Image (cartoon, grey):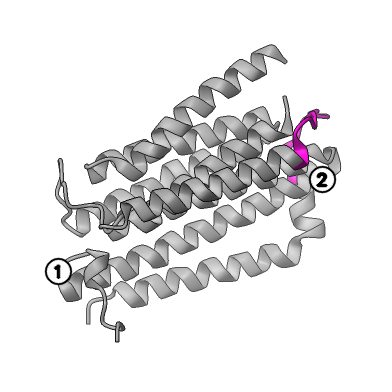
Amino acid sequence: MYLTQFLLLAAFLFCTGVYGVIARKNAVLVLMSIELILNAVNINLVAFGAFQGFETSIVGQVFSLFVVAVAAAEVGVGLAIVLLIFRNRASIDLTEVDLMKG
Amino acid sequence: MVAQNIVFGVLAAVMGISAIRVVTTKNVVHAALYLVLVLAGVAGIFLLLAAEFLAVVQVLVYIGAIVVLFLFGVMLTRATIGRDSDLDNDQRWLGALIGGGIFAGLAWLLIDAFGDEKLRIEGIGRTSDVGLAIFQTYVIPFEVISVLLLAALVGAVVIARKD
């Protein structure tokens, strides 16, 4: 196995997530795309850790665990915000959330 | 090694197609279910990289909790169950351009930098090693993560509370 194949897979997931964040207007779908990006980061951390040898592979896994925890927190707060937007505006269309636009 | 490459190819194909379906499908619930496929594929990739504890955590936390949270979000925001043609904004081509551009740049950079680096998996990443690393070297970041999760929990309750 080459290191590059994992990195390329992660890069593909990351770019798909970026596309989703830009092109979607349903807020829940944007959060899903952010999950794709975070998973790409996790693959990168674990692959680079394994590439550097056994000691570092454990470090990569620990950092990846931290990213998982932060992702869980992010989804919780993000969905709460989406619910609040829905309650106030009866829609989660992100193109309509433009109150701060000048 | 051949078997690992075949498994990687299958996983990568499934993940690639599912990831594209997550960001292009017209159905919100289908997007969440395709996301399950991607996350399960990531767990398989972790197994290939000998990170078994992380693979189990991936299944438990992502597939078990986060996707369910997403489905709750879909349900509570009363999104259309079924086809909904109004999920994309008019920046689709811009997004494709930016995503494709970043991928092309990253691919060129990665192949240039790590093109022929072999990945040798030495030893098995046992759960006890991960646990020791967390609770010895990284115990302070671990505690900070705990506080962060608590803060996020309280914050989510406060934000979503009806008053």
Asked whether, in this view, residue B27 is left or right of residue B62, the answer is: left
Query: Label 1 crowding class (10 Å Cα cut-off): few <14, some 14-19, many 20+?
Result: few
- At mark 2, the secondary structure is helix
Asked whether, in this view, residue A92 is left or right of residue A77, the answer is: left
Whole-percent x, y for residue A27 in the image? 30, 60
Residue at the extreme top: B2
Instruction: Quickly name the residue at label 2.
Output: A56
Contact? badges 2 and 1 (CB < 8 Å): no
- At mark 1, the secondary structure is loop
Quarter placement of the C terminus of chain B? bottom left
The type of residue carrying mark 2 is Thr
* Residue found at x 77% / y 49%: A59
Whole-percent x, y for residue A12 in the image? 53, 40
Whole-percent x, y for residue A41 in the image? 60, 50
Find residue A5 and report its image quarter.
top right
Q: In the image, is residue B147 above or below residue B98?
A: below
Numbered circle sitting on residue B140:
none
Does any portion of residue B106 appear in the rendered image? yes
Indicate the chain on which mark 1 is placed.
A
Query: Label 2 crowding class (10 Å Cα cut-off): few <14, some 14-19, many 20+?
Result: some
Residue segment shown in magenta: B113-130
Q: In the image, is residue A14 above or below residue B145?
A: above
The type of residue carrying mark 1 is Ala
* Residue found at x 74% / y 45%: B130
Lower position in the chain sequence, tag 2 or tag 1: 2
Numbered circle sitting on residue A90:
1
Q: In the image, is residue B141 above or below residue B81?
A: below
* Residue found at x 33% / y 37%: B33
Quarter placement of the N terminus of chain B? top right
Whole-percent x, y for residue B20 in the image? 39, 38
Q: Nearer the viewer, residue B59 or A27?
A: A27
Give the CA distance from mark 2 to mark 1: 49 Å
